[in-house]
Image (cartoon, grey):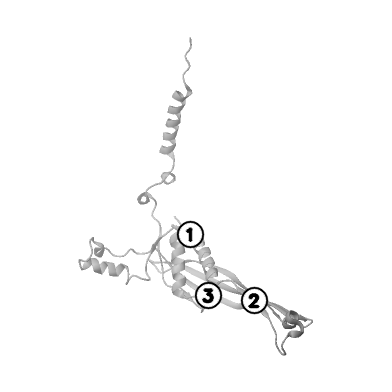
Amino acid sequence: MNRKIPCTSICLPLILAACMVLFSTAPAWSWGTPPEELPPRKTVTIYQFDSTVPEISPASATDMFMTALIKTRAFDVLERQRLDESVYQEKQLNQGGTTTGDVAQHRPTGADFIFVGVITEANAQSERTGMAGTYDGVGMETSGEKAEIGLDVRVIDAKTGKVLDAVNVRKTISESGHSISGLGKRLFGKKTLKGANLGIASDKKESIDKALRDIIEEAVNMLVSRYEE
């Protein structure tokens, strides 16, 4: 009488052996390599942006760019804007014996690349449209404008000062509005007070802050695609 051997007693060892082969031959990063074993990332820093747009603060634009760059996890980003009130202050505390550790003995890390940016333009009248008219004492008017905001970023070699690359992005900001006048008689008929009138107006403008975030995100993505390890 032939005895049947359960499939699990044969299949399970084969599956385990196959898994061991896969683990031993697959790239280390695909299985969650510890950060210290990954290839080194480029070290970068950002100095304060310039802005020719009154509504945009250079300091705010710099912070937004740094935040977007850090979130990509493609670079090691160094602080340069607030060294005095952060890194240097901590080193002074350590040097004076106020804190534990040996941070005072270590110099700040140098950068491979420096990113320098400028908000280059915001043309408030790059395109303007409008329409107006009246009918039976009621006036109507619509209008629309398109402004443009731009960001240019240069990539500088920190060792040589050579400009290695540059990216530039542009975004259109739309503004629209409409108004209606002469509604007094229409709404109140003969009871309208002499000389009284009623109008309705509405304006809508895309946020400059949102437009700035959009062009910063696009510029950062371009830099990551070019320089990520």
- Amino acid identity at mark 2: Ser
In this view, the residue in front, 71 or 46, is 71
Side of 41 where 128 appears, left or right: right
Q: How many dots with numbers?
A: 3
Q: Earlier in the sequence, mark 3 or mark 2?
A: 3
At x 52%, y 71%, the residue is 209
Q: Residue furthest bottom?
A: 194
For label 3, the residue is 120
Mark 1 residue crowding within 10 angstroms, few (<14) / some (14–19) / many (20+): some
- Amino acid identity at mark 1: Val
For label 1, the residue is 224
- Amino acid identity at mark 3: Thr
Q: Give me the C-alpha separation between circle 1 and circle 2.
A: 41 Å
Q: Secondary structure at mark 1?
A: helix
Q: Considering only vertical position in the picture, is 28 above or below 227?
A: above
In this view, the residue in front, 103 or 135, is 135
Q: Earlier in the sequence, mark 1 or mark 3?
A: 3
Dividing the picture into quarters, in which one does residue 27 lie? top left
Where residue 64 appears, x then y in whole percent? Answer: 46, 68
Q: Residue furthest top?
A: 1
At x 46%, y 26%, the residue is 11
Q: Give me the C-alpha separation between circle 1 and circle 3.
A: 22 Å
Q: Quadrant of the C terminus?
A: bottom left
Q: Secondary structure at mark 2?
A: strand
Q: Which mark is residue 202?
A: 2
Where residue 55 appears, x then y in whole percent? Answer: 51, 77
Q: Give me the C-alpha separation between circle 3 and circle 2.
A: 30 Å
